[in-house]
Amino acid sequence: MARPVLHDSALRSRLLDVTAELVDREGPARVALRQIAAAAGTSTTAVYSLFGGKSELLSAVIDGGFASFGDAQRAAADGGLRALGIAYREWALAHPALYRLMFGGALASYAECAADPETADRSIEPLRRSIAEGQADGSMKQAPLEDVAAVIWAQVHGLVSLELAGIAPPEADWDAAYNAGLDAVSRAWAP
């Protein structure tokens, strides 16, 4: 008779979510597996069984973040560059702790914790494809694709990062600022 499944995908997801929140709030060095397990309503045995250890758990958090972010980008890809920019912000605002961990560098100094380069790279493939299509149909300036992608990504990333950090006057209208930023991107790369 087969053994019952003790650690299912729901528990795995819960552990990833709890880990992102705790590490974002307290930093990777200050969060213990016991604390993560307790917050997820399970034991450290489940963490070891599902992930292997703390470094693997943190890497899984980042990989899961890039996979989810990539899914959101792919879902918006048919709408073009502006839709990708809107999806970027919507995903970040829906997952602020995860966004900060993916892009904020808190885990970069933590030993043996890194995103899978292929997963991270796949997440921006919709941006590259949109740029290539725009250049092919003449709606975007010709320039090296990777340079254009880096500049566009930096612009939307900067706006979203500032919004999440709360770096603006209290009366700032982030919707308007972000839309103005997307308009500026469009103008900058128009032929």
Image (cartoon, grey):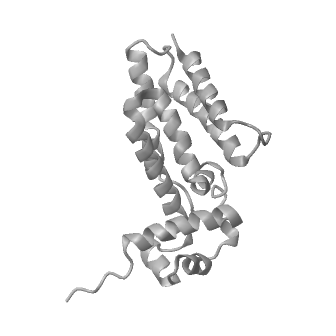
Q: Residue at x 53, y 44 (%)?
A: 90
Residue 172 appears at what percent x and percent y?
74, 37
Residue ID at (70%, 41%): 162
Residue 145 image point, x, y percent = 48, 24
Which residue in the rendered view is the most extreme toward the left? 1
Above/below status of 72 relative to 115: above
Q: Residue furthest right?
A: 169
Front one among 117 and 90: 90
- Seen at 44% across and 49% down, the residue is 119
Question: In which image quadrant can residue 187 be found?
Answer: top right
Q: Residue furthest bottom?
A: 1
Q: Nearer the viewer, residue 132 or 15?
A: 15
Does residue 98 sit above or below 13 in this rendering?
Answer: above
Q: Is residue 26 left or right of residue 60?
A: right
Above/below status of 40 relative to 94: below
Q: Residue furthest front?
A: 171
Can residue 56 be seen? no
Q: Nearer the viewer, residue 50 or 36?
A: 36
Residue 73 seen by the camera = yes
Counting the numbered discs, the total is 0
Q: Position of residue 50 (x, y in %)?
A: 43, 74
Residue 78 rendering spot, x and y as whole percentages: 37, 31
In the depicted view, which residue is nearer to us: 3 or 21?
A: 21
**Quarter holding the N terminus?**
bottom left
Asked which quadrant contains residue 173, the reply is top right
Residue at horizontal 52 percent and vertical 29 percent from the top = 149
